[in-house]
Image (cartoon, helix red, strand yellow):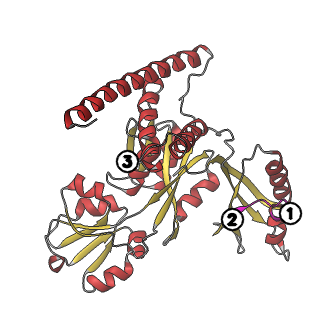
Amino acid sequence: MKTLAEARDAIDALDQHIQRLISDRARIAQQVARIKQKQGDTGDHYRPSREAEVLRRAMERNRGPGGGPLTDEVIARLMREIMSACLSLESPLTVAYLGPEGTYTQSAALKHFGDAVTVRPLTAVDEIFRDVESGAADYGVVPVENSIGGVVTHTLDALVHTKLRICGEVMLPVHHHLLSRETSLTAVNTVYAHPQSFAQTRKWLDSRLPRAEREQVSSNGEAARIAGERGGAAIAGLPAARLYGLNILASNIEDDPGNTTRFLIIGKHDPSATGSDLTSFVATAHRNQPGALFTLLKPLADAQIDMTRIESRPVRGSPVPDYYFFIDFGGHSSDHAARAVLDQVRANAAFFKILGSYPKAVM
Protein backbone atom coordinates (compact mmCIF):
# COMPACT_ATOMS: atom_id res chain seq x y z
CA MET A 1 0.00 0.00 0.00
CA LYS A 2 1.45 3.27 -1.15
CA THR A 3 -1.42 5.68 -0.56
CA LEU A 4 -3.61 6.67 2.37
CA ALA A 5 -6.70 5.67 0.40
CA GLU A 6 -5.32 2.15 -0.13
CA ALA A 7 -4.54 1.80 3.58
CA ARG A 8 -8.01 2.95 4.57
CA ASP A 9 -9.64 0.57 2.10
CA ALA A 10 -7.61 -2.28 3.59
CA ILE A 11 -8.69 -1.31 7.14
CA ASP A 12 -12.34 -1.12 6.06
CA ALA A 13 -12.13 -4.61 4.56
CA LEU A 14 -10.50 -5.99 7.72
CA ASP A 15 -13.11 -4.31 9.92
CA GLN A 16 -15.85 -5.97 7.90
CA HIS A 17 -14.14 -9.35 8.23
CA ILE A 18 -13.55 -8.93 11.98
CA GLN A 19 -17.17 -7.94 12.55
CA ARG A 20 -18.40 -10.97 10.63
CA LEU A 21 -16.18 -13.28 12.70
CA ILE A 22 -17.37 -11.73 15.98
CA SER A 23 -20.97 -12.24 14.88
CA ASP A 24 -20.17 -15.88 14.07
CA ARG A 25 -18.69 -16.28 17.56
CA ALA A 26 -21.78 -14.74 19.13
CA ARG A 27 -24.08 -17.12 17.24
CA ILE A 28 -22.03 -20.09 18.47
CA ALA A 29 -22.34 -18.72 22.02
CA GLN A 30 -26.12 -18.80 21.59
CA GLN A 31 -25.86 -22.42 20.44
CA VAL A 32 -23.76 -23.24 23.50
CA ALA A 33 -26.52 -21.83 25.69
CA ARG A 34 -29.13 -24.03 24.00
CA ILE A 35 -26.92 -27.12 24.34
CA LYS A 36 -26.38 -26.46 28.04
CA GLN A 37 -30.09 -25.91 28.62
CA LYS A 38 -30.90 -29.26 26.98
CA GLN A 39 -28.35 -30.85 29.33
CA GLY A 40 -30.16 -29.33 32.30
CA ASP A 41 -27.62 -26.58 32.99
CA THR A 42 -29.93 -23.70 33.87
CA GLY A 43 -27.46 -21.68 35.96
CA ASP A 44 -25.12 -18.97 34.79
CA HIS A 45 -22.69 -20.04 32.08
CA TYR A 46 -19.67 -18.08 33.27
CA ARG A 47 -16.69 -20.41 33.73
CA PRO A 48 -13.61 -18.70 35.23
CA SER A 49 -11.23 -21.50 34.25
CA ARG A 50 -12.43 -21.48 30.62
CA GLU A 51 -12.06 -17.71 30.34
CA ALA A 52 -8.58 -17.77 31.89
CA GLU A 53 -7.48 -20.39 29.35
CA VAL A 54 -8.85 -18.36 26.42
CA LEU A 55 -7.06 -15.22 27.59
CA ARG A 56 -3.76 -17.01 28.16
CA ARG A 57 -3.90 -18.56 24.69
CA ALA A 58 -4.63 -15.17 23.15
CA MET A 59 -1.56 -13.68 24.82
CA GLU A 60 0.59 -16.65 23.81
CA ARG A 61 -0.48 -16.18 20.18
CA ASN A 62 0.36 -12.51 20.48
CA ARG A 63 3.96 -13.36 21.49
CA GLY A 64 4.36 -16.13 18.93
CA PRO A 65 4.69 -16.22 15.13
CA GLY A 66 2.22 -13.84 13.55
CA GLY A 67 1.94 -11.79 16.73
CA GLY A 68 1.30 -8.11 16.28
CA PRO A 69 2.32 -4.73 17.66
CA LEU A 70 -0.36 -4.66 20.40
CA THR A 71 0.67 -5.51 23.95
CA ASP A 72 -0.55 -8.62 25.76
CA GLU A 73 -2.64 -6.40 28.02
CA VAL A 74 -4.43 -4.80 25.07
CA ILE A 75 -5.04 -8.18 23.41
CA ALA A 76 -6.43 -9.60 26.66
CA ARG A 77 -8.70 -6.59 27.13
CA LEU A 78 -10.09 -6.92 23.60
CA MET A 79 -10.70 -10.64 24.05
CA ARG A 80 -12.31 -10.02 27.43
CA GLU A 81 -14.84 -7.63 25.90
CA ILE A 82 -15.67 -10.06 23.09
CA MET A 83 -16.18 -12.87 25.61
CA SER A 84 -18.23 -10.60 27.84
CA ALA A 85 -20.55 -9.62 24.99
CA CYS A 86 -20.97 -13.25 23.88
CA LEU A 87 -21.56 -14.49 27.43
CA SER A 88 -24.33 -11.91 27.85
CA LEU A 89 -26.19 -13.74 25.06
CA GLU A 90 -25.89 -17.02 26.98
CA SER A 91 -26.70 -15.81 30.49
CA PRO A 92 -26.51 -12.14 31.55
CA LEU A 93 -24.55 -11.69 34.77
CA THR A 94 -25.09 -9.35 37.70
CA VAL A 95 -21.93 -8.48 39.62
CA ALA A 96 -21.94 -6.74 43.01
CA TYR A 97 -19.03 -4.48 43.93
CA LEU A 98 -18.00 -1.99 46.59
CA GLY A 99 -19.59 1.28 45.47
CA PRO A 100 -20.58 3.92 44.76
CA GLU A 101 -19.80 4.32 41.08
CA GLY A 102 -16.25 5.33 40.25
CA THR A 103 -14.44 3.09 42.76
CA TYR A 104 -11.40 0.96 42.01
CA THR A 105 -13.54 -2.08 42.83
CA GLN A 106 -15.84 -1.17 39.95
CA SER A 107 -12.78 -0.92 37.69
CA ALA A 108 -11.68 -4.37 38.87
CA ALA A 109 -15.16 -5.80 38.18
CA LEU A 110 -15.20 -4.45 34.63
CA LYS A 111 -11.62 -5.56 34.03
CA HIS A 112 -12.50 -9.12 35.00
CA PHE A 113 -16.02 -9.46 33.56
CA GLY A 114 -16.02 -6.90 30.75
CA ASP A 115 -18.60 -4.18 30.15
CA ALA A 116 -21.46 -6.49 29.11
CA VAL A 117 -22.47 -7.27 32.71
CA THR A 118 -24.84 -5.53 35.07
CA VAL A 119 -22.83 -4.03 37.92
CA ARG A 120 -24.47 -3.45 41.28
CA PRO A 121 -22.82 -0.98 43.69
CA LEU A 122 -23.13 -1.72 47.40
CA THR A 123 -21.90 0.21 50.41
CA ALA A 124 -20.06 -2.47 52.41
CA VAL A 125 -18.10 -5.69 51.91
CA ASP A 126 -20.52 -7.77 53.99
CA GLU A 127 -23.41 -6.53 51.80
CA ILE A 128 -21.62 -7.91 48.73
CA PHE A 129 -21.34 -11.33 50.38
CA ARG A 130 -25.04 -11.26 51.34
CA ASP A 131 -26.06 -10.18 47.82
CA VAL A 132 -24.29 -13.14 46.23
CA GLU A 133 -25.44 -15.59 48.90
CA SER A 134 -29.07 -14.54 48.37
CA GLY A 135 -28.84 -14.74 44.58
CA ALA A 136 -29.42 -11.02 44.03
CA ALA A 137 -26.01 -11.01 42.31
CA ASP A 138 -24.27 -13.85 40.50
CA TYR A 139 -20.79 -12.82 41.62
CA GLY A 140 -19.15 -10.27 43.86
CA VAL A 141 -15.87 -8.37 43.67
CA VAL A 142 -14.17 -7.47 46.95
CA PRO A 143 -10.76 -5.93 47.69
CA VAL A 144 -8.47 -8.15 49.77
CA GLU A 145 -5.02 -6.52 49.89
CA ASN A 146 -2.93 -3.64 48.64
CA SER A 147 0.81 -3.69 48.06
CA ILE A 148 1.20 -0.60 50.28
CA GLY A 149 -1.81 -0.48 52.61
CA GLY A 150 -1.94 -4.18 53.47
CA VAL A 151 -4.96 -6.44 53.87
CA VAL A 152 -8.64 -5.52 53.86
CA THR A 153 -9.75 -7.03 57.16
CA HIS A 154 -13.51 -6.92 56.41
CA THR A 155 -12.98 -9.25 53.46
CA LEU A 156 -10.89 -11.74 55.44
CA ASP A 157 -13.43 -11.79 58.26
CA ALA A 158 -16.31 -12.39 55.83
CA LEU A 159 -14.48 -15.26 54.11
CA VAL A 160 -14.31 -17.25 57.37
CA HIS A 161 -18.08 -17.53 57.74
CA THR A 162 -19.47 -17.46 54.19
CA LYS A 163 -20.52 -20.49 52.14
CA LEU A 164 -19.32 -18.71 48.99
CA ARG A 165 -16.13 -19.67 47.20
CA ILE A 166 -13.29 -17.63 45.77
CA CYS A 167 -13.69 -18.02 42.00
CA GLY A 168 -10.92 -15.76 40.74
CA GLU A 169 -8.62 -12.83 41.42
CA VAL A 170 -7.93 -9.47 39.79
CA MET A 171 -4.67 -7.56 40.08
CA LEU A 172 -5.33 -3.87 39.44
CA PRO A 173 -2.50 -1.33 39.19
CA VAL A 174 -3.74 1.62 41.24
CA HIS A 175 -2.94 5.16 40.15
CA HIS A 176 -4.33 7.82 42.46
CA HIS A 177 -5.31 11.27 41.22
CA LEU A 178 -6.28 14.39 43.13
CA LEU A 179 -9.67 15.49 41.82
CA SER A 180 -11.58 18.68 42.55
CA ARG A 181 -13.85 21.35 41.14
CA GLU A 182 -11.11 23.79 42.09
CA THR A 183 -8.43 24.58 39.51
CA SER A 184 -5.32 24.78 41.70
CA LEU A 185 -3.79 23.05 44.72
CA THR A 186 -3.71 26.30 46.65
CA ALA A 187 -7.52 26.34 46.78
CA VAL A 188 -7.75 22.89 48.40
CA ASN A 189 -8.30 22.85 52.17
CA THR A 190 -9.90 19.40 52.66
CA VAL A 191 -9.00 16.06 51.06
CA TYR A 192 -11.45 13.15 51.09
CA ALA A 193 -10.35 9.55 50.59
CA HIS A 194 -10.61 5.98 51.76
CA PRO A 195 -8.15 5.21 54.60
CA GLN A 196 -6.17 2.89 52.31
CA SER A 197 -5.73 5.70 49.79
CA PHE A 198 -4.45 8.05 52.48
CA ALA A 199 -1.92 5.39 53.47
CA GLN A 200 -0.81 5.04 49.86
CA THR A 201 -0.37 8.79 49.23
CA ARG A 202 0.88 9.99 52.64
CA LYS A 203 4.27 11.26 51.47
CA TRP A 204 2.79 13.19 48.55
CA LEU A 205 0.15 14.80 50.76
CA ASP A 206 2.70 15.69 53.44
CA SER A 207 4.83 17.38 50.80
CA ARG A 208 2.23 19.10 48.61
CA LEU A 209 -0.80 19.65 50.89
CA PRO A 210 0.59 19.62 54.44
CA ARG A 211 -2.09 21.99 55.82
CA ALA A 212 -5.14 20.40 54.21
CA GLU A 213 -7.49 18.45 56.46
CA ARG A 214 -7.87 14.75 55.67
CA GLU A 215 -11.37 13.31 55.93
CA GLN A 216 -11.78 9.52 55.72
CA VAL A 217 -14.79 8.20 53.81
CA SER A 218 -16.08 4.73 52.93
CA SER A 219 -14.71 4.64 49.36
CA ASN A 220 -12.88 6.71 46.77
CA GLY A 221 -16.08 6.88 44.74
CA GLU A 222 -17.79 8.47 47.73
CA ALA A 223 -14.84 10.85 48.09
CA ALA A 224 -15.26 11.99 44.48
CA ARG A 225 -19.01 12.37 44.95
CA ILE A 226 -18.63 14.84 47.83
CA ALA A 227 -15.48 16.58 46.57
CA GLY A 228 -17.54 19.20 44.78
CA GLU A 229 -17.72 21.25 47.95
CA ARG A 230 -15.76 24.49 47.93
CA GLY A 231 -12.14 23.79 48.80
CA GLY A 232 -12.67 20.05 48.61
CA ALA A 233 -10.65 17.45 46.73
CA ALA A 234 -10.76 13.66 46.43
CA ILE A 235 -8.19 10.94 45.94
CA ALA A 236 -9.68 8.64 43.33
CA GLY A 237 -9.25 7.13 39.86
CA LEU A 238 -9.86 8.65 36.46
CA PRO A 239 -13.30 7.03 36.03
CA ALA A 240 -14.47 9.02 39.07
CA ALA A 241 -13.21 12.26 37.51
CA ARG A 242 -15.29 11.60 34.37
CA LEU A 243 -18.33 10.45 36.33
CA TYR A 244 -18.49 13.46 38.66
CA GLY A 245 -17.06 16.13 36.33
CA LEU A 246 -13.98 16.91 38.41
CA ASN A 247 -10.71 18.53 37.41
CA ILE A 248 -7.48 16.54 37.71
CA LEU A 249 -5.20 18.66 39.88
CA ALA A 250 -2.43 16.04 40.10
CA SER A 251 -1.89 12.57 38.63
CA ASN A 252 -0.16 9.43 39.90
CA ILE A 253 0.25 10.75 43.44
CA GLU A 254 0.75 7.28 44.99
CA ASP A 255 4.00 6.98 46.93
CA ASP A 256 4.88 3.68 45.23
CA PRO A 257 4.60 3.59 41.41
CA GLY A 258 4.10 -0.18 41.65
CA ASN A 259 1.00 0.27 43.82
CA THR A 260 -1.34 -2.66 43.13
CA THR A 261 -4.58 -3.84 44.72
CA ARG A 262 -5.69 -7.45 44.65
CA PHE A 263 -9.40 -8.21 44.40
CA LEU A 264 -11.23 -11.52 44.81
CA ILE A 265 -14.17 -12.80 42.78
CA ILE A 266 -16.67 -14.57 45.05
CA GLY A 267 -19.44 -16.89 43.86
CA LYS A 268 -21.08 -20.27 44.36
CA HIS A 269 -19.02 -22.37 41.95
CA ASP A 270 -15.66 -24.15 42.17
CA PRO A 271 -13.59 -23.44 39.05
CA SER A 272 -11.85 -26.44 37.51
CA ALA A 273 -8.06 -26.64 37.30
CA THR A 274 -6.27 -24.69 34.56
CA GLY A 275 -2.64 -25.54 35.32
CA SER A 276 -2.03 -22.03 36.65
CA ASP A 277 -4.08 -21.81 39.82
CA LEU A 278 -4.10 -20.69 43.43
CA THR A 279 -5.73 -22.32 46.43
CA SER A 280 -6.75 -20.32 49.49
CA PHE A 281 -7.60 -21.77 52.89
CA VAL A 282 -8.01 -20.56 56.45
CA ALA A 283 -7.03 -22.48 59.57
CA THR A 284 -6.34 -22.08 63.26
CA ALA A 285 -3.56 -23.86 65.11
CA HIS A 286 -4.14 -25.77 68.34
CA ARG A 287 -3.69 -23.38 71.25
CA ASN A 288 -1.07 -23.80 73.96
CA GLN A 289 1.02 -26.19 71.90
CA PRO A 290 4.61 -25.11 71.17
CA GLY A 291 5.32 -25.09 67.44
CA ALA A 292 1.62 -25.38 66.54
CA LEU A 293 1.90 -22.99 63.56
CA PHE A 294 5.04 -24.78 62.35
CA THR A 295 3.18 -28.09 62.54
CA LEU A 296 0.27 -26.55 60.61
CA LEU A 297 2.44 -25.32 57.73
CA LYS A 298 5.07 -28.08 57.61
CA PRO A 299 3.14 -30.26 55.10
CA LEU A 300 3.40 -27.47 52.49
CA ALA A 301 7.17 -27.23 52.93
CA ASP A 302 7.60 -31.03 52.88
CA ALA A 303 5.70 -31.24 49.58
CA GLN A 304 7.66 -28.26 48.18
CA ILE A 305 4.43 -26.40 47.52
CA ASP A 306 4.86 -22.66 46.98
CA MET A 307 3.05 -20.72 49.71
CA THR A 308 2.41 -17.30 48.18
CA ARG A 309 0.73 -15.50 51.09
CA ILE A 310 -0.02 -15.81 54.79
CA GLU A 311 -2.05 -13.37 56.89
CA SER A 312 -3.39 -13.58 60.42
CA ARG A 313 -6.58 -12.22 61.99
CA PRO A 314 -7.72 -12.54 65.61
CA VAL A 315 -10.61 -14.90 66.28
CA ARG A 316 -13.47 -12.74 67.51
CA GLY A 317 -15.07 -13.77 70.77
CA SER A 318 -12.30 -16.15 71.75
CA PRO A 319 -11.70 -16.11 75.54
CA VAL A 320 -7.95 -16.41 74.95
CA PRO A 321 -5.82 -14.98 72.13
CA ASP A 322 -6.34 -17.06 69.00
CA TYR A 323 -5.78 -16.36 65.32
CA TYR A 324 -7.07 -17.36 61.91
CA PHE A 325 -4.27 -17.90 59.40
CA PHE A 326 -5.18 -17.16 55.78
CA ILE A 327 -2.88 -19.00 53.39
CA ASP A 328 -2.54 -19.06 49.60
CA PHE A 329 -0.43 -21.53 47.67
CA GLY A 330 0.20 -22.36 44.04
CA GLY A 331 -1.88 -25.29 42.80
CA HIS A 332 -5.46 -26.56 42.66
CA SER A 333 -7.14 -28.48 45.45
CA SER A 334 -8.11 -31.20 42.97
CA ASP A 335 -4.43 -31.95 42.26
CA HIS A 336 -3.27 -35.15 43.96
CA ALA A 337 -0.30 -33.49 45.71
CA ALA A 338 -2.34 -30.51 46.88
CA ARG A 339 -5.17 -32.73 48.12
CA ALA A 340 -2.76 -34.80 50.21
CA VAL A 341 -1.21 -31.66 51.73
CA LEU A 342 -4.60 -30.15 52.55
CA ASP A 343 -5.63 -33.37 54.29
CA GLN A 344 -2.52 -33.18 56.47
CA VAL A 345 -3.11 -29.52 57.31
CA ARG A 346 -6.73 -30.30 58.18
CA ALA A 347 -5.61 -33.07 60.52
CA ASN A 348 -3.25 -30.68 62.35
CA ALA A 349 -5.70 -27.77 62.58
CA ALA A 350 -8.22 -26.82 65.23
CA PHE A 351 -10.31 -25.17 62.49
CA PHE A 352 -9.87 -25.61 58.74
CA LYS A 353 -11.73 -24.35 55.65
CA ILE A 354 -10.85 -24.27 51.95
CA LEU A 355 -11.87 -20.86 50.60
CA GLY A 356 -11.44 -21.78 46.95
CA SER A 357 -9.17 -22.92 44.12
CA TYR A 358 -9.20 -20.55 41.17
CA PRO A 359 -7.17 -19.33 38.16
CA LYS A 360 -4.33 -16.92 38.84
CA ALA A 361 -4.92 -13.41 37.54
CA VAL A 362 -4.12 -13.41 33.83
CA MET A 363 -2.81 -9.83 33.77
What residue is shown with label 1?
302
Q: Is residue 241 left or right of residue 331?
A: left
What residue is shown with label 2?
324
Q: Amino acid at mark 3?
A: Pro
Residue drawn at x 24%, y 32% is 6
Other-residue count near label 3 (Cα within 10 Å), few / some / many at <14 / 14–19 / ≥20: many
Q: Which residues are magenta?
A: 301-309
Q: Amino acid at mark 2?
A: Tyr
- Report the quarter where the N terminus lies: top left
Residue 300: quarter of image: bottom right
Separation of residues labelled 1 and 2 (CA atoms): 22 Å
Give x and y (percent) for residue 314. 64, 70
Q: Is residue 262 left or right of residue 323?
A: left
Work out whether mark 1 precedes mark 2 in sequence or the reverse, and give the earlier one: 1
Work out whether mark 3 precedes mark 1 in sequence or the reverse, and give the earlier one: 3
Labels 3, 1: front one: 1
The stretch drawn in magenta includes residue 306: yes
